[in-house]
Amino acid sequence: MTSELIYICAGSGLVGLAFYRLATCRDMLLRVLSLNVLAVGIAILFLASARDAGMTDAVPQAFVLTGIVVLVAVTAALLALAEQIDRQRDE
Amino acid sequence: MSLAFDVLLAFGVVFTAAAALGTHDRVASIAGFVVTGLLVALSLVRLGAPDVALAEAAIGAGLTGALLLRSAWRLKPAESRVSPPIDRIIVALIAVCLSGALAWAVYTAPGAALYPALVSERLAESGVTNPVTAVLLNFRAWDTLLEIAVLFVALILVRIVAPAHPQPVVLGELMLPFARIVVPMCAFLAGHLLWQGASVPGGAFQAGAILAGGSLVLMLGGFAVPTPRLLSWGMMVALLGLAVFAVAALSTEALTGTLLLYPDGAAKIWILMIEALLTLSIAAMLCLLFCGMPRRPLK
Protein backbone atom coordinates (compact mmCIF):
# COMPACT_ATOMS: atom_id res chain seq x y z
CA MET A 1 0.00 0.00 0.00
CA THR A 2 2.91 2.35 0.71
CA SER A 3 4.17 2.30 -2.87
CA GLU A 4 0.66 3.22 -4.06
CA LEU A 5 0.69 6.13 -1.60
CA ILE A 6 4.00 7.34 -3.09
CA TYR A 7 2.55 7.34 -6.60
CA ILE A 8 -0.69 8.94 -5.41
CA CYS A 9 1.45 11.78 -4.01
CA ALA A 10 3.39 12.04 -7.30
CA GLY A 11 0.16 12.08 -9.35
CA SER A 12 -1.51 14.73 -7.24
CA GLY A 13 1.74 16.71 -7.26
CA LEU A 14 1.66 16.73 -11.06
CA VAL A 15 -1.99 17.87 -11.03
CA GLY A 16 -1.15 20.72 -8.64
CA LEU A 17 1.88 21.86 -10.66
CA ALA A 18 -0.05 21.76 -13.93
CA PHE A 19 -2.97 23.65 -12.39
CA TYR A 20 -0.63 26.40 -11.14
CA ARG A 21 0.99 26.72 -14.58
CA LEU A 22 -2.33 26.75 -16.41
CA ALA A 23 -3.57 29.56 -14.20
CA THR A 24 -0.46 31.76 -14.34
CA CYS A 25 0.84 31.28 -17.87
CA ARG A 26 -0.23 33.19 -20.99
CA ASP A 27 1.81 31.25 -23.50
CA MET A 28 -0.44 28.96 -25.53
CA LEU A 29 2.21 26.29 -26.06
CA LEU A 30 2.98 26.05 -22.36
CA ARG A 31 -0.73 25.86 -21.59
CA VAL A 32 -1.12 22.87 -23.90
CA LEU A 33 1.95 21.33 -22.26
CA SER A 34 0.45 21.92 -18.79
CA LEU A 35 -2.78 20.28 -19.90
CA ASN A 36 -0.76 17.21 -20.89
CA VAL A 37 0.97 17.14 -17.51
CA LEU A 38 -2.44 17.43 -15.82
CA ALA A 39 -3.75 14.45 -17.76
CA VAL A 40 -0.66 12.39 -16.97
CA GLY A 41 -1.08 13.17 -13.26
CA ILE A 42 -4.70 12.01 -13.38
CA ALA A 43 -3.62 8.83 -15.19
CA ILE A 44 -1.12 8.02 -12.41
CA LEU A 45 -3.77 8.69 -9.74
CA PHE A 46 -6.28 6.49 -11.56
CA LEU A 47 -3.87 3.57 -11.93
CA ALA A 48 -2.50 3.89 -8.38
CA SER A 49 -6.07 3.63 -7.08
CA ALA A 50 -6.74 0.62 -9.34
CA ARG A 51 -4.13 -1.49 -7.54
CA ASP A 52 -5.52 -4.28 -5.43
CA ALA A 53 -3.41 -6.99 -3.77
CA GLY A 54 -0.55 -6.58 -6.23
CA MET A 55 -2.79 -6.74 -9.31
CA THR A 56 -3.89 -3.78 -11.42
CA ASP A 57 -7.48 -3.72 -12.63
CA ALA A 58 -7.65 -4.10 -16.44
CA VAL A 59 -10.65 -1.79 -16.95
CA PRO A 60 -8.97 1.39 -15.62
CA GLN A 61 -5.89 0.42 -17.64
CA ALA A 62 -8.00 0.35 -20.79
CA PHE A 63 -9.58 3.70 -19.86
CA VAL A 64 -6.20 5.35 -19.33
CA LEU A 65 -4.91 3.88 -22.61
CA THR A 66 -7.93 5.37 -24.37
CA GLY A 67 -7.29 8.63 -22.53
CA ILE A 68 -3.68 8.83 -23.76
CA VAL A 69 -4.76 8.37 -27.38
CA VAL A 70 -7.57 10.92 -27.08
CA LEU A 71 -5.13 13.33 -25.40
CA VAL A 72 -2.73 13.29 -28.34
CA ALA A 73 -5.66 14.03 -30.66
CA VAL A 74 -6.74 16.91 -28.42
CA THR A 75 -3.17 18.22 -28.27
CA ALA A 76 -2.87 18.21 -32.06
CA ALA A 77 -6.24 19.93 -32.41
CA LEU A 78 -5.39 22.59 -29.78
CA LEU A 79 -2.03 23.31 -31.38
CA ALA A 80 -3.68 23.67 -34.80
CA LEU A 81 -6.17 26.14 -33.28
CA ALA A 82 -3.35 28.02 -31.52
CA GLU A 83 -1.46 28.35 -34.81
CA GLN A 84 -4.63 29.65 -36.45
CA ILE A 85 -5.06 32.25 -33.66
CA ASP A 86 -1.44 33.31 -34.18
CA ARG A 87 -1.95 33.71 -37.91
CA GLN A 88 -5.08 35.81 -37.42
CA ARG A 89 -3.26 38.07 -34.97
CA ASP A 90 -0.62 38.70 -37.62
CA GLU A 91 -3.14 39.86 -40.21
CA MET B 1 15.02 -1.52 -1.84
CA SER B 2 12.06 -1.28 -4.20
CA LEU B 3 10.52 1.29 -1.88
CA ALA B 4 13.61 3.47 -2.23
CA PHE B 5 13.32 3.10 -6.03
CA ASP B 6 9.65 4.12 -5.92
CA VAL B 7 10.41 7.18 -3.80
CA LEU B 8 13.26 8.20 -6.11
CA LEU B 9 11.15 7.66 -9.23
CA ALA B 10 8.16 9.59 -7.86
CA PHE B 11 10.47 12.41 -6.82
CA GLY B 12 12.04 12.37 -10.29
CA VAL B 13 8.62 12.59 -11.96
CA VAL B 14 7.53 15.59 -9.90
CA PHE B 15 10.94 17.26 -10.17
CA THR B 16 11.21 16.97 -13.98
CA ALA B 17 7.60 18.14 -14.34
CA ALA B 18 8.35 21.16 -12.15
CA ALA B 19 11.48 21.87 -14.19
CA ALA B 20 9.51 21.55 -17.45
CA LEU B 21 6.74 23.85 -16.25
CA GLY B 22 9.03 26.28 -14.47
CA THR B 23 11.30 27.35 -17.29
CA HIS B 24 10.45 29.99 -19.89
CA ASP B 25 12.67 28.42 -22.53
CA ARG B 26 10.23 26.49 -24.68
CA VAL B 27 12.62 23.87 -26.01
CA ALA B 28 13.86 23.17 -22.48
CA SER B 29 10.23 22.87 -21.35
CA ILE B 30 9.44 20.35 -24.04
CA ALA B 31 12.60 18.37 -23.32
CA GLY B 32 11.61 18.30 -19.66
CA PHE B 33 8.13 17.17 -20.62
CA VAL B 34 9.50 14.26 -22.69
CA VAL B 35 11.75 13.17 -19.82
CA THR B 36 8.77 13.40 -17.45
CA GLY B 37 6.77 11.22 -19.84
CA LEU B 38 9.48 8.55 -19.88
CA LEU B 39 9.76 8.56 -16.08
CA VAL B 40 5.97 8.34 -15.86
CA ALA B 41 6.11 5.33 -18.19
CA LEU B 42 8.58 3.71 -15.80
CA SER B 43 6.33 4.41 -12.82
CA LEU B 44 3.37 2.93 -14.70
CA VAL B 45 5.40 -0.27 -15.06
CA ARG B 46 5.93 -0.16 -11.31
CA LEU B 47 2.16 0.26 -10.91
CA GLY B 48 1.60 -2.95 -12.87
CA ALA B 49 0.29 -1.35 -16.07
CA PRO B 50 2.87 -2.15 -18.79
CA ASP B 51 0.33 -1.72 -21.62
CA VAL B 52 -0.32 1.85 -20.53
CA ALA B 53 3.41 2.42 -19.97
CA LEU B 54 4.16 1.47 -23.59
CA ALA B 55 1.47 3.85 -24.84
CA GLU B 56 2.68 6.64 -22.56
CA ALA B 57 6.27 6.27 -23.76
CA ALA B 58 5.35 6.12 -27.45
CA ILE B 59 2.42 8.56 -27.59
CA GLY B 60 2.51 10.63 -24.40
CA ALA B 61 6.24 11.33 -24.44
CA GLY B 62 7.30 10.69 -28.05
CA LEU B 63 4.56 11.92 -30.38
CA THR B 64 3.24 14.66 -28.09
CA GLY B 65 6.80 15.91 -27.65
CA ALA B 66 7.23 15.95 -31.43
CA LEU B 67 3.94 17.84 -31.88
CA LEU B 68 4.91 20.41 -29.26
CA LEU B 69 8.38 20.91 -30.77
CA ARG B 70 6.84 21.37 -34.21
CA SER B 71 4.50 24.07 -32.90
CA ALA B 72 7.21 25.71 -30.78
CA TRP B 73 8.76 26.99 -34.00
CA ARG B 74 5.47 28.15 -35.46
CA LEU B 75 3.85 29.83 -32.48
CA LYS B 76 5.15 33.19 -31.38
CA PRO B 77 5.83 33.37 -27.65
CA ALA B 78 3.24 35.37 -25.74
CA GLU B 79 4.42 38.72 -24.38
CA SER B 80 5.87 37.78 -21.03
CA ARG B 81 3.49 39.56 -18.72
CA VAL B 82 4.10 38.09 -15.31
CA SER B 83 1.02 37.92 -13.13
CA PRO B 84 1.22 40.01 -9.93
CA PRO B 85 2.77 38.15 -6.96
CA ILE B 86 -0.46 38.19 -4.97
CA ASP B 87 -2.25 36.32 -7.78
CA ARG B 88 0.52 33.76 -7.96
CA ILE B 89 0.45 33.18 -4.22
CA ILE B 90 -3.31 32.65 -4.28
CA VAL B 91 -3.08 30.27 -7.25
CA ALA B 92 -0.23 28.36 -5.56
CA LEU B 93 -2.32 27.99 -2.40
CA ILE B 94 -5.29 26.71 -4.41
CA ALA B 95 -2.99 24.29 -6.27
CA VAL B 96 -1.54 22.93 -3.00
CA CYS B 97 -5.05 22.50 -1.56
CA LEU B 98 -6.18 20.77 -4.77
CA SER B 99 -3.21 18.37 -4.67
CA GLY B 100 -3.73 17.56 -1.01
CA ALA B 101 -7.47 17.04 -1.41
CA LEU B 102 -6.95 14.79 -4.45
CA ALA B 103 -4.32 12.65 -2.71
CA TRP B 104 -6.50 12.34 0.37
CA ALA B 105 -9.61 11.49 -1.65
CA VAL B 106 -7.87 8.87 -3.78
CA TYR B 107 -6.05 7.31 -0.83
CA THR B 108 -9.12 7.02 1.38
CA ALA B 109 -11.59 6.04 -1.36
CA PRO B 110 -13.25 2.73 -0.49
CA GLY B 111 -11.67 0.21 -2.82
CA ALA B 112 -14.37 -2.26 -3.77
CA ALA B 113 -12.85 -3.55 -7.01
CA LEU B 114 -15.72 -4.76 -9.16
CA TYR B 115 -14.09 -5.47 -12.50
CA PRO B 116 -11.14 -7.88 -11.95
CA ALA B 117 -13.46 -10.75 -11.05
CA LEU B 118 -15.75 -10.08 -14.03
CA VAL B 119 -12.81 -9.74 -16.45
CA SER B 120 -11.04 -12.93 -15.31
CA GLU B 121 -14.32 -14.85 -15.40
CA ARG B 122 -14.99 -14.01 -19.06
CA LEU B 123 -11.39 -13.82 -20.27
CA ALA B 124 -11.50 -17.34 -21.74
CA GLU B 125 -14.36 -16.34 -24.08
CA SER B 126 -12.71 -13.13 -25.23
CA GLY B 127 -10.32 -14.78 -27.71
CA VAL B 128 -7.22 -13.17 -26.18
CA THR B 129 -5.37 -13.73 -22.92
CA ASN B 130 -4.16 -10.19 -22.25
CA PRO B 131 -6.96 -8.70 -20.09
CA VAL B 132 -6.31 -5.14 -21.28
CA THR B 133 -6.66 -6.14 -24.95
CA ALA B 134 -9.76 -8.14 -24.01
CA VAL B 135 -11.33 -5.04 -22.44
CA LEU B 136 -10.28 -2.74 -25.30
CA LEU B 137 -11.35 -4.90 -28.23
CA ASN B 138 -14.00 -7.20 -26.83
CA PHE B 139 -15.77 -6.19 -23.63
CA ARG B 140 -15.60 -2.45 -24.26
CA ALA B 141 -14.94 -2.45 -28.01
CA TRP B 142 -17.61 0.22 -28.43
CA ASP B 143 -15.40 2.67 -26.49
CA THR B 144 -12.50 1.90 -28.78
CA LEU B 145 -14.63 2.43 -31.87
CA LEU B 146 -15.66 5.85 -30.57
CA GLU B 147 -12.02 6.62 -29.68
CA ILE B 148 -11.01 6.05 -33.28
CA ALA B 149 -13.86 8.34 -34.28
CA VAL B 150 -12.48 11.01 -31.90
CA LEU B 151 -9.05 10.71 -33.52
CA PHE B 152 -10.65 11.11 -36.91
CA VAL B 153 -12.62 14.18 -35.80
CA ALA B 154 -9.37 15.75 -34.53
CA LEU B 155 -7.82 14.99 -37.90
CA ILE B 156 -10.69 16.73 -39.71
CA LEU B 157 -10.33 19.74 -37.40
CA VAL B 158 -6.61 19.97 -38.12
CA ARG B 159 -7.39 19.73 -41.82
CA ILE B 160 -9.94 22.54 -41.63
CA VAL B 161 -8.02 25.08 -39.55
CA ALA B 162 -4.42 24.48 -40.54
CA PRO B 163 -3.49 24.23 -44.20
CA ALA B 164 -0.39 22.15 -44.57
CA HIS B 165 3.09 23.41 -44.35
CA PRO B 166 5.09 20.24 -44.29
CA GLN B 167 8.49 21.71 -45.01
CA PRO B 168 11.16 19.24 -44.06
CA VAL B 169 14.51 20.96 -43.91
CA VAL B 170 17.60 19.17 -45.12
CA LEU B 171 19.14 17.31 -42.22
CA GLY B 172 22.76 16.34 -41.75
CA GLU B 173 24.69 13.38 -43.06
CA LEU B 174 23.87 11.20 -40.07
CA MET B 175 20.19 11.14 -41.02
CA LEU B 176 20.56 8.30 -43.53
CA PRO B 177 22.44 5.87 -41.24
CA PHE B 178 19.99 6.79 -38.45
CA ALA B 179 16.96 6.10 -40.63
CA ARG B 180 18.44 2.86 -41.93
CA ILE B 181 18.47 1.48 -38.42
CA VAL B 182 15.41 3.16 -36.93
CA VAL B 183 12.80 2.72 -39.68
CA PRO B 184 13.14 -1.09 -40.08
CA MET B 185 13.28 -1.39 -36.30
CA CYS B 186 10.03 0.56 -36.01
CA ALA B 187 8.28 -1.63 -38.57
CA PHE B 188 9.56 -4.77 -36.88
CA LEU B 189 8.68 -3.57 -33.39
CA ALA B 190 5.18 -2.50 -34.48
CA GLY B 191 4.47 -5.94 -35.94
CA HIS B 192 5.82 -7.59 -32.82
CA LEU B 193 3.74 -5.43 -30.46
CA LEU B 194 0.62 -6.00 -32.55
CA TRP B 195 1.02 -9.77 -32.56
CA GLN B 196 2.01 -10.16 -28.92
CA GLY B 197 -0.76 -7.80 -27.76
CA ALA B 198 -3.13 -10.79 -27.68
CA SER B 199 -1.30 -12.47 -24.83
CA VAL B 200 1.20 -10.06 -23.23
CA PRO B 201 1.41 -6.23 -23.06
CA GLY B 202 1.21 -4.54 -26.44
CA GLY B 203 -1.54 -3.91 -28.97
CA ALA B 204 -2.82 -1.77 -31.81
CA PHE B 205 -2.29 1.63 -30.20
CA GLN B 206 1.30 1.07 -29.17
CA ALA B 207 2.12 -0.53 -32.52
CA GLY B 208 0.40 2.28 -34.42
CA ALA B 209 2.30 4.94 -32.49
CA ILE B 210 5.65 3.30 -33.18
CA LEU B 211 4.81 2.90 -36.86
CA ALA B 212 3.86 6.60 -36.93
CA GLY B 213 7.23 7.44 -35.37
CA GLY B 214 8.99 5.49 -38.11
CA SER B 215 7.02 7.24 -40.85
CA LEU B 216 7.84 10.61 -39.33
CA VAL B 217 11.54 9.74 -39.57
CA LEU B 218 11.00 9.01 -43.27
CA MET B 219 9.11 12.26 -43.79
CA LEU B 220 11.33 14.58 -41.77
CA GLY B 221 14.44 12.97 -43.21
CA GLY B 222 13.23 13.85 -46.70
CA PHE B 223 13.00 10.23 -47.81
CA ALA B 224 9.25 10.38 -48.32
CA VAL B 225 8.24 13.88 -49.39
CA PRO B 226 4.68 14.58 -48.13
CA THR B 227 3.16 15.39 -51.50
CA PRO B 228 -0.62 15.99 -51.68
CA ARG B 229 -1.00 12.58 -53.31
CA LEU B 230 0.83 10.83 -50.47
CA LEU B 231 -1.18 12.77 -47.90
CA SER B 232 -4.50 11.87 -49.50
CA TRP B 233 -3.42 8.22 -49.51
CA GLY B 234 -2.65 8.66 -45.82
CA MET B 235 -6.13 10.06 -45.34
CA MET B 236 -7.61 7.01 -47.06
CA VAL B 237 -5.66 4.66 -44.77
CA ALA B 238 -6.75 6.73 -41.78
CA LEU B 239 -10.38 6.38 -42.81
CA LEU B 240 -9.98 2.66 -43.54
CA GLY B 241 -9.52 1.67 -39.88
CA LEU B 242 -12.62 3.54 -38.77
CA ALA B 243 -14.64 2.20 -41.71
CA VAL B 244 -13.59 -1.41 -41.14
CA PHE B 245 -14.28 -1.15 -37.42
CA ALA B 246 -17.73 0.31 -38.09
CA VAL B 247 -18.49 -2.39 -40.68
CA ALA B 248 -17.30 -5.06 -38.23
CA ALA B 249 -19.61 -3.61 -35.59
CA LEU B 250 -22.56 -3.73 -37.97
CA SER B 251 -21.75 -7.27 -39.13
CA THR B 252 -21.55 -8.54 -35.57
CA GLU B 253 -24.93 -6.92 -35.02
CA ALA B 254 -26.26 -8.85 -38.04
CA LEU B 255 -24.53 -12.13 -37.10
CA THR B 256 -25.12 -12.31 -33.36
CA GLY B 257 -27.82 -9.73 -32.73
CA THR B 258 -25.60 -7.69 -30.41
CA LEU B 259 -23.31 -4.85 -31.39
CA LEU B 260 -19.65 -5.93 -31.24
CA LEU B 261 -20.40 -9.34 -29.76
CA TYR B 262 -18.15 -11.54 -31.88
CA PRO B 263 -19.46 -14.93 -33.09
CA ASP B 264 -18.66 -17.86 -30.79
CA GLY B 265 -15.11 -19.17 -31.07
CA ALA B 266 -14.14 -16.69 -33.77
CA ALA B 267 -13.35 -13.78 -31.45
CA LYS B 268 -9.59 -14.11 -31.90
CA ILE B 269 -9.65 -13.77 -35.69
CA TRP B 270 -12.09 -10.82 -35.55
CA ILE B 271 -9.95 -9.03 -32.97
CA LEU B 272 -6.76 -9.69 -34.92
CA MET B 273 -8.23 -8.38 -38.19
CA ILE B 274 -9.60 -5.25 -36.54
CA GLU B 275 -6.36 -4.63 -34.65
CA ALA B 276 -4.17 -5.05 -37.73
CA LEU B 277 -6.17 -2.48 -39.69
CA LEU B 278 -6.43 -0.19 -36.68
CA THR B 279 -2.64 -0.21 -36.36
CA LEU B 280 -2.20 1.06 -39.92
CA SER B 281 -5.01 3.54 -39.49
CA ILE B 282 -3.75 4.89 -36.15
CA ALA B 283 -0.25 5.25 -37.61
CA ALA B 284 -1.64 7.21 -40.56
CA MET B 285 -3.79 9.42 -38.34
CA LEU B 286 -0.98 10.25 -35.91
CA CYS B 287 1.33 10.97 -38.82
CA LEU B 288 -1.21 13.27 -40.49
CA LEU B 289 -1.93 15.04 -37.20
CA PHE B 290 1.78 15.85 -37.14
CA CYS B 291 2.36 16.96 -40.70
CA GLY B 292 -1.06 18.44 -41.55
CA MET B 293 -2.82 18.28 -44.90
CA PRO B 294 -3.38 20.60 -47.82
CA ARG B 295 -6.95 21.72 -48.26
CA ARG B 296 -6.85 21.12 -51.97
CA PRO B 297 -4.27 19.59 -54.24
CA LEU B 298 -1.47 22.02 -54.94
CA LYS B 299 -1.07 22.95 -58.58
Image (cartoon, helix red, strand yellow):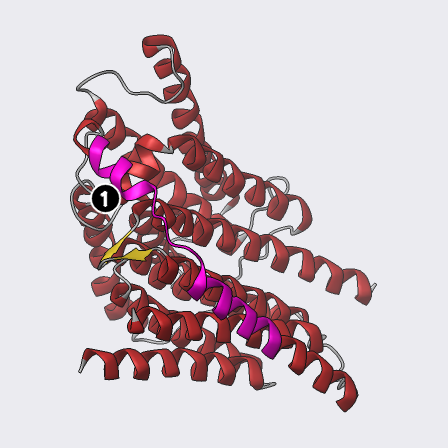
Query: In this picture, is B264 found above or below B42?
Result: above
Instruction: Using the image, determine if residue B256 lies above or below residue B92.
Output: above
Q: Residue at x 64, y 50 (%)?
A: B163
Residue that mark 1 sits on: B194
Q: Label 1 amino acid?
A: Leu
Q: Is residue B118 magenta?
A: yes
Looking at the rendered image, the quarter that the N terminus of chain A falls into is bottom left
Q: Nearer the viewer, residue B233 or B126?
A: B126
Q: Main secondary structure of the magenta part?
A: helix
Q: Is residue B216 magenta?
A: no
Q: Nearer the viewer, residue B39 or A45?
A: A45
Q: Position of residue B118 (x, y in %)?
A: 28, 35
Q: How many marks?
A: 1
Image coordinates for residue B92, horizontal then vertical, percent: 65, 82
Question: Magenta span covers which residues?
Answer: B96-122
Pick the front one: B211 or B194: B194
In the rendered image, residue B211, in percent from the top left (x then y), is placed at 31, 51
Q: Is residue B223 visible?
A: no
Q: Quadrant of the C terminus of chain A?
A: bottom right
Q: Give the quadrant of residue B274.
A: top left
Residue A71 visible here = yes
Q: Chain of mark 1?
A: B
**Lateral position of residue B72 relative to residue B83, left or right:** left
> Looking at the image, which residue sits at the far right?
A91
Q: Residue at x 53, y 40 (%)?
A: B150
